[in-house]
């Protein structure tokens, strides 16, 4: 085995800030009335093992830069991964050439100067792991070994992995804004296959965090993956019917993301969302509250400013079930006659307020119905709200799991599903920038036999 190496540190922020400033000046010299530059630099280590053997060891070092220039309301953009001075000058020139040949767009331009972040809060996002190749391999092997040893019915493995990434983001524009922040993301994952006389089932588990000290133990991840795979053995289909459905926390985030996509500015001004013109209208039951909290320390969705340098801030998206805010960047805001909400680049920690019960409590409240633990396909129409996904999970009767279920479809309309949201569990999944517990929907169509 080669000598262990730690993942490399990201480049010096001061050097990249200087580079951004120089390119903004270059754009000015070439006649641009306004310009913005974003640069990213990432380093990392990824290790994958399978059946006790090392499959891959990868070191990552990626960098990229994007330049957008404005000649009045004409816009041009260009990007490069080559940070040599001559390549950067060519990139600025390419953006300027594009802008000179594009049509006027009155909504084009930088975000308003008064919306720029004046202070860059420390959100505690940068926690290098310092793990070397040998330790990463040991950790991945410990994860997979724990899964394979957990139950004799674990017959095969799709492998275990350890990933550690550190990145630096720098953004500046001709309003005088220049901001930078570093962040990390680490994970341990495992996927295994269980077998019985009736067939095989696959399942997985993973842990991810900014701070490696907050990762679940590798052995615990492996055991959880094995437990989930074994639990799915001897699954069967169910008769087609309408029943309540509980989405387990790790798949419930998908429902919330569909809602967030429906209130995204680009979908709204294009009239491509079923929630067009729904601001101030009730779309969930009265108990539902959804907030955006971009300044949570260490959270995976936290950011001090958005992709346009606009200061992020806490705000309420849904209150008492009523839609209170959209997700807008400066362009979509102008198209809608509104103001940016600091969401260029996406949402920053969308959190639906949990209720008093855990998953077991939600199953008891449901009585008889379906617990969904896996979804397949992309069967939804954002324009109409129609929703249909392949699913697997467990049939529940009397508030208790009776048997695993597979080869079924869950279907409904997102309008009805959101209004039929009966309860949110307190088993909140913290592994993404969308935080939710398990979700109980009052009624959906479950299509099987």
Image (cartoon, rainbow, N blue to C red):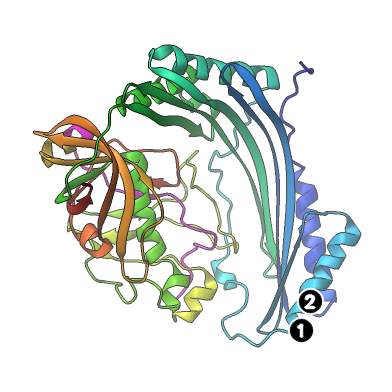
Q: Residue 171's x, y, as percent?
A: 67, 58
Q: Tell me the number on the disc at residue 100.
A: 1
Number of residues whose C-alpha sits closer than 10 Å to that of mark 2, classed few (under 14), some (14–19) or many (20 or more): many
Residue at disc 1, secondary structure: helix
Quadrant of the image occupied by residue 39: bottom right
Instruction: Give yes or no for residue 347 being in the magenta stretch.
Output: yes
Q: Residue 434's x, y, as percent?
A: 40, 48
Do the residues under discs 1 and 2 have CB atoms within 8 angstroms? yes
Residue visible at 67% across and 28% down?
A: 56
- Whether residue 60 is situated above or below residue 51 in the rendered picture: below
Tell which of 123 and 364 is nearer to you.
364
Q: Is residue 358 visible?
A: no
Query: Which quadrant is home to the N terminus?
Result: top right
Distance from Cα at disc 1 to Cα at disc 2: 6 Å
Label 2 sits on residue: 96
Q: Main SS type for the magenta part?
A: loop
- Whether residue 11 is situated above or below residue 419 in the rendered picture: above
The region drawn magenta spans 338-361
Q: Tell me the number on the disc at residue 70.
A: none
């Amino acid at each position: 085995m080669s000598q262990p190496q730690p993942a490399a540190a990201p480049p010096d922020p001061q050097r990249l800030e200087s580079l951004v400033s120089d390119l903004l000046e270059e754009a000015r010299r070439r006649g641009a009335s306004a310009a913005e530059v974003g640069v990213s630099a990432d380093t990392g280590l990824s290790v994958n093992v399978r059946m006790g053997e090392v499959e891959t060891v990868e070191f990552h070092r990626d960098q990229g830069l994007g330049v957008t220039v404005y000649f009045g309301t004409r816009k041009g953009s260009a990007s490069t991964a080559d940070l040599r001075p001559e390549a950067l000058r060519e990139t600025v020139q390419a953006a300027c050439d594009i802008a000179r040949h594009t049509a006027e767009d009155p909504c084009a331009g930088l975000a308003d100067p008064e919306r720029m972040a004046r202070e860059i809060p420390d959100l505690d996002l940068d926690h290098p792991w310092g793990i070397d190749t040998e330790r990463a391999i040991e950790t991945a092997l410990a994860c997979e070994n724990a899964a394979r040893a957990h139950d004799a019915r674990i017959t095969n493995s799709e492998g275990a992995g350890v990933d550690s990434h550190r990145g630096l983001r720098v953004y500046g524009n001709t309003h005088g804004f220049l901001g930078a922040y570093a962040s990390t993301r680490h994970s341990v994952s495992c996927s295994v296959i269980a077998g019985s006389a009736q067939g095989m089932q696959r399942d997985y588990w993973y842990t991810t965090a900014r701070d490696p000290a907050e990762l679940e133990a590798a052995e615990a991840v492996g055991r959880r993956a094995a437990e989930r795979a074994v639990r799915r053995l001897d699954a069967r289909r169910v008769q087609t019917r309408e029943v309540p459905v509980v989405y387990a926390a790790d798949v419930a985030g998908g429902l919330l993301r569909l809602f967030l996509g429906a209130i995204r500015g680009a979908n709204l001004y294009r009239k491509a969302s079923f929630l067009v013109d729904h601001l101030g209208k009730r779309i969930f039951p009265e108990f539902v509250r959804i907030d955006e909290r971009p300044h949570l320390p260490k959270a995976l969705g936290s950011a001090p400013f958005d992709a346009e340098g606009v200061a992020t801030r806490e705000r309420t998206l849904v209150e008492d079930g009523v839609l209170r805010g959209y997700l807008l960047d400066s362009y979509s805001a102008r198209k809608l006659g509104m103001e940016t909400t600091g969401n260029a680049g996406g949402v920053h920690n969308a959190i639906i307020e949990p209720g008093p019960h855990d998953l077991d409590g939600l199953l008891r409240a449901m009585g008889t119905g379906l617990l969904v633990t896996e979804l397949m396909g992309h069967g939804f129409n954002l324009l109409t709200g129609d929703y249909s996904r392949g699913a697997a999970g467990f049939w529940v009767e009397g508030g208790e799991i009776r048997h695993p279920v597979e080869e079924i479809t869950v279907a409904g309309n997102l309008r009805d599903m959101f209004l039929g949201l009966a309860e949110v569990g307190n088993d909140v999944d913290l592994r993404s920038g969308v935080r939710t517990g398990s979700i109980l929907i009052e009624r959906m169509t479950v299509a099987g036999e």
